[in-house]
Amino acid sequence: MDKLIDLGPEFWTAAGETLYMVFFTMLFGGLAGLVLGIGLYVTRKGGLLPNTVVNNVLNVLINFFRPIPFIIFIAAVQPLTRAVIGIGIGTNAAVFALSLAASFAIGRIVEQNLLTVKPGVIEAARSMGAGPWRILTTVVIGEALGPLILGYTFIIVAVIDMSAMAGFLGGGGLGYFAQLYGYRQFEPIVTWAAVLLIIVFVQIVQYLGNWLARKVLRR
Amino acid sequence: MAIVSLANVSKSYPSPERGAPRIVAVDDVSLEIEAGEVTGIIGYSGAGKSTLVRLINALEPVTEGTVTIDGRAITGLPERELRAVRLGIGMIFQQFNLFEAKTVAQNVAYPLKVAGWGKAEITARVQELLDFVGLADKARAYPDQLSGGQKQRVGIARALATRPRILLADEATSALDPETTQEVLALLKRVNEEYGVTMVVITHEMDVIQSIATKVAVMDGGRVIEQGDVFDVFSDPQHASSRKFVSTVVQGVPSPAELAVLRERHPGRIATFSFRDGDASQARVFVELAQAGLEFELVYGGINDIRGRAFGHLTLAIRGEEAAIDRALARIGELVAVTEPPVGDGAQNGEAR
């Protein structure tokens, strides 16, 4: 316990790093994933702007990257990280790798949630003379907002989980803290402190997500 | 001049199986819809009714033929111009297809936003429409808080928002209970009468045709096999398929199964006499049979009313000497339509005399 009190500053720094990584990953990866998911949704057969070629390219891209375990993915994209961020290690490098990996997963989740919108509702909008872009922005996204919020909540929790591996490239965070000061130094209390804080983060995120979705869905 | 005109219109889709012939949903249909009329499109499911109406507002492009709306051929127009055409054609649906995430008022306002109306005009128009359909108090409600009938009234308000001259209804009352159906039909009738909106109404319900349609087209296998005045088509369908369809929605003609039971219970020859407003009276038919010395009993029947004109069918079991029955039926055949359902398949397509 004394050990944990001694490690106070490092603990809170690590917590800050985790929040930093999750926030920016959701910002960049969340947007990129939204674009990917919308791209998949509109280009599919019978979609708002059907385009077999684009749809196939996006599908292959996502299916190619999604199954790669994140720990291997970090190493595999390091040259790209270096090219984009300028450095292959550190918290920002971790954010880049996290954003990339998250965007593929988010793309699928967005696509799935948009597909829950009933085709009849889209047909009704078409019958009123609305064009594809208008239907997407004013009908489809609004109708799918509840499930989309829950999907994004799910992804935030997954990103919190993935961010624990950021220590692998010097990104810090609670996962790294638990490894370094807890596991390797035989201090289970330190490990558990990190785990508990992560659980608290997850609980808060899930609670907020559920609350927001309920508000949108009015149930 | 017709407000909607379909000339030799066909719609086919590539078959999902490789090498199989294309699936023909609408097959060489020509149809003229006059302004102000309510045209019912009837037929069994899969007959191509839904596809046909979607050709009118170009939700589906035609494969062949020409669709003309208000004197303007819309076939082959670019999508952007078709959107403008659709603004002038309202549509309502069996499942209502309301935007669940929008309030009633926002649903009704949507087509007006698409049409580029100003904010104040939209507010006024939405109020006017909700008053018209009797849902002014539900403006802020969401669709999942409404009953089926209320949802369809919102659908109607939404479809009429931009003051279209044409309204397409795809089984608009099929998901409603009989009482609510009557309410919605009364509303549609008002839309037709007060605003002069031309309507094309897909249905398989007799109620709908009886209460609002003035013209009817019968579809079967993608073709319009019969069209005309509602009373004429229903009281005296010409085509075997339309006769079969009409007999399923019109009371008074026994179904094949009922016919089999009738034959078991009642000895003698079974014949159906069809009476139309203005035809010879039932009494004359009975007198003919009695004068021929035949014995007969009424085994099945029903009288229908379409817009104040009656027609009906009476099915009799006739007993007596075969030749006498033949002679009597021939004489009666000159007065009213006589159908003798053939024994065996019992279908309603027996030879009319």
Image: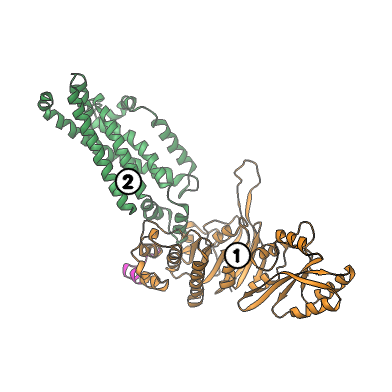
Q: Secondary structure at mark 2?
A: helix
The percent coordinates of residue B144 (x first, y second) are: 39, 58
Visual colour scheme: by chain
**Magenta residues, start to end:** B114-124
Q: Is residue B194 above or below residue A168?
A: below
Q: Most prominent secondary structure in the magenta stretch?
A: helix
Can residue B218 be seen? yes
Q: In the image shown, does B102 or A193 lie closer to the viewer?
A: A193
Q: Which residue is mark 2?
A: A149
Residue B110 magenta-highlighted: no
The percent coordinates of residue B150 (x first, y second) are: 43, 65
Q: Which residue is mark 1?
A: B41
Q: Is residue A176 above or below residue A149?
A: above
The percent coordinates of residue A80 (x first, y second) are: 31, 29
Can residue B347 be seen? no
Q: In the image shown, does A146 or A128 lie closer to the viewer?
A: A146
Name the residue at the top extreme: A185
Q: Which chain is green?
A: A
Q: Which chain is orange?
A: B
